[in-house]
Structure formats: C-alpha cells, structure tokens
Amino acid sequence: MRFLNNALSGRSPLLIDPAIAQSHAATAEKFGFTDLLAQIFGEMPKPYKVGSVGVIPIVGVIGKGLSPIEKMTGSADLNDINKNIDAYELDPEVKTIVFHIDSPGGVVGGVEETARKIANLSKPTVSYTDGMMASAAYWLGASADRVVASPSSDVGSVGVYMAIPDMSGLYKAAGVSMVVIKSSATPLKAAGIEGTSLSDEQISNYQSQVDAIYEEFVQSIKYKRKMVQAEALQGQTMSGKVAATKGLLTGLADSIDLLLV
C-alpha cells in the first residue's frame, strides 16, 4: 500500500499506531485482484441519511488521494470525506451531521484541513465510535461539536511520530559503505538514505517537524474540547469510559442509534 509504505519507510510523519500500520500494509500488499479484494474486505460503508441526520462513515486507515485498490483494502480517503461533508452541508434535508468513526488513524497530510472543515461547519456535528477513534481519526472526531463513544471503544492516541530505519550496521557487516555526495549548502538533504545514519542536525530537523504537527493536533483538539486534560494527550489510547473522564469525549452511548433519533 503506497501511502502507508512511504510513511513507514520514514518519508513522512504518521498519526497511527505503527503495529497497526504495518499489519494493514502487509495485508493489502498480499492481494492483487479487485474481485478478490472485494470478497475479502467487503464494500466500504457509504454515507446515508436517517430522517434529518446525515451520517458520514470514516472507517479504516486514513489517507489522501488514494487509489481504488487502497480504498478497497480498507482505507478512508480524506478527499471522499471532504466531498461528503460538502454535500451534507448543502443538503437542506440534513440538519445534523454525524461522523461514524472506526479508524486507528493514518498519515498526516490533509488531516488538519479536514478537521478544520468539520470544526467550521454551520450545522451541528457529532462524532461517534463504537470501535476505535485514535490518532488522526481522533483529530477529525474531536473537531465535531460533540464527541461520543461506547464505553468499551478505544479513544485517543494523541501523538505524532516518524520511523526511520538505520541500516548502517547491516551494511557495514556486509562490507558495504554508502557514500552520499550532496550539495554543500544542504545538510538536511538526503536524510535517511538506506545504509546511512541520520546526523544530529537531521534528527533535530525531523524532531521539530513532529513537534510542530503535535502542537497543531493539540490546538485543534482544544478548539472544541476545552476541558481536555493534559495527561490524556501523551500518546496513549484508553477506553471510552476513561476518555470521558479525561475530557476527550462529551458523552457515552452504547450505540449510534441513540444519536439518530
């Protein structure tokens, strides 16, 4: 899976648990035929209306500009989510928009903008999970007016990371030395090339990027979730029951059906 593999190789920050990301990418790469994929993963849920409530599902690993196969293997495309939001914002029949979320998160690109779109909607909004609302998915969910979860759901994972493998020891053991020649004025160029180690300056640059994204994440949460506790923003997930006591949620509900009446 292109967008996850690129991020996992250290090319971009991530907003998803690394084990889940690796498992999802491996499963998606294992299969190559569209019909087989549909049989294995089923149809992705589509938006629907219940009376005056418009429901937008956000299910699977979150990315942006995904291929049909990436979507079919269980990923949510922010471009599709944005189109669905715009459609319900303009639909006179829809009075309230509910985001039904079951996602471990995803890559960073596009999440901040979609979260801002949700936060600025003119219609009342609610996000709900009875599965997982973590990392990038929580960033989106927290932007709704109300955030509701089932007591046993997984919520949180507020944090950002980059994973860059250092294979210099492996190359050295094989008798291979990687020589990188780059422009003298660009010490941050070509960071993380296989067989090399990152310099202190390169690590510092990546750290500043990750910290800046985290600060945007937290500020976005606090825009709507003013009662969130600092101890809930340290990268951990927790049950919906616990998340409600930490300010990550505004309420608990055993089923989304309770929000559609």
Image (cartoon, rainbow, N blue to C red):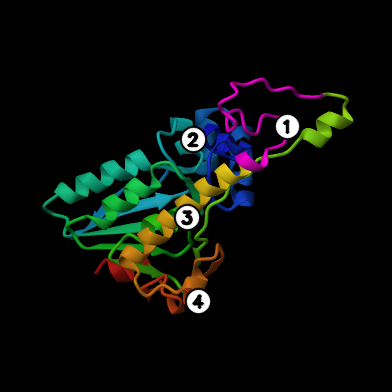
Q: Is residue 106 left or right of residue 100?
A: right
Q: Nearer the viewer, mark 4 or mark 1?
A: 1
Disc 2 target residue: 70
Q: Could you give the CA–CA distance between mark 4 and mark 1, rounded to whole angstroms?
A: 43 Å
Disc 4 target residue: 242
- SS label for mark 1: loop
Look at the numbered discs 4 and 2 and tell me whether their residues touch, using CB distance below 8 Å: no
First in sequence: mark 2 vs mark 3: 2
First in sequence: mark 4 vs mark 3: 3
- The mark found on residue 196 in the picture is 1
- SS label for mark 3: helix
- The mark found on residue 208 in the picture is none
Q: Pick whichever, 206 or 243, lies toward us.
A: 206
Q: Which residue appears farthest toward the front when viewing the image?
A: 185
Q: Nearer the viewer, mark 2 or mark 1?
A: 1
Stretch in magenta? 177-202
Look at the numbered discs 4 and 3 and tell me whether their residues touch, using CB distance below 8 Å: no
First in sequence: mark 4 vs mark 2: 2
